[in-house]
Image: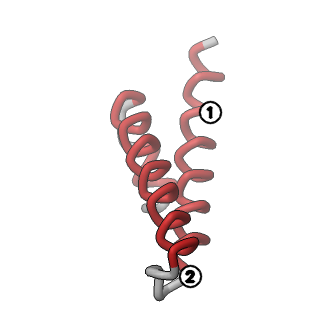
């Protein structure tokens, strides 16, 4: 998801997306450890998605303060 699309979401939606992305990253790491993950680029993609979501969430929280 692009940062511009993330910025259109509400804070609650961003938090929900962030939780989902963290869960997806955890599962992908587990699959990598057990040898089930074929596409290792998934880890990088999900990690960057988490960073995008966290950045926009932090921007929103900073604006409110």
Query: Is residue 8 positioned above or below 41 on the image?
Result: above
Left/right of residue 26 with respect to residue 12 in the rendered view: right
Would you identify the image quadrant in which residue 33 lies? bottom right
- Rate crowding at label 2 as few (under 14), some (14 to 19) or many (20 or more) other CA atoms within 10 Å: few
Q: Mark 1: few, some, or many residues within 10 Å (few <14, many ≥20)?
A: few
Task: Give residue 44's position: percent from left, percent from top.
Answer: 61, 71
**Secondary element at image label 2:** loop
51 with respect to 30 (left or right) = right
Please report whichever mark, 2 or 1, sits nearer to the chain's N-terminal start.
Answer: 2
Residue drawn at point x = 62 percent, y = 33 percent: 59
The label number, if any, that marks residue 59 in the structure image: 1
Q: Quadrant of residue 41?
A: bottom right
| Residue drawn at (44%, 60%) of the image | 27
Q: Nearer the viewer, mark 2 or mark 1?
A: 2
Question: Where does the image place residue 7, in percent across and percent down from the top left?
Answer: 46, 44
Give how far across and how far down residue 60 sits, in percent. Answer: 55, 28
14 and 60: which is toward the camera: 14
Query: Disc 2 to disc 1, how far (Cα)?
Result: 30 Å
The one nearer the camera, 57 or 7, is: 57
Q: Which quadrant holds the C terminus?
A: top right
Q: Nearer the viewer, residue 19 or 52?
A: 19
Q: Position of residue 4 (x, y in %)?
A: 47, 54
Numbered badge on residue 40: 2
Q: Is residue 57 above or below residue 38?
A: above
């Amino acid at each position: 998801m692009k940062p511009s699309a993330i910025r259109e979401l509400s804070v609650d939606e961003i938090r929900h997306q962030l939780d989902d992305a963290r869960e997806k990253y955890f599962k992908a790491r587990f699959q990598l450890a057990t040898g089930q993950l074929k596409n290792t680029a998934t880890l990088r993609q999900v990690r960057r998605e988490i960073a995008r979501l966290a950045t926009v969430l932090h921007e929103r929280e900073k604006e409110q303060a």
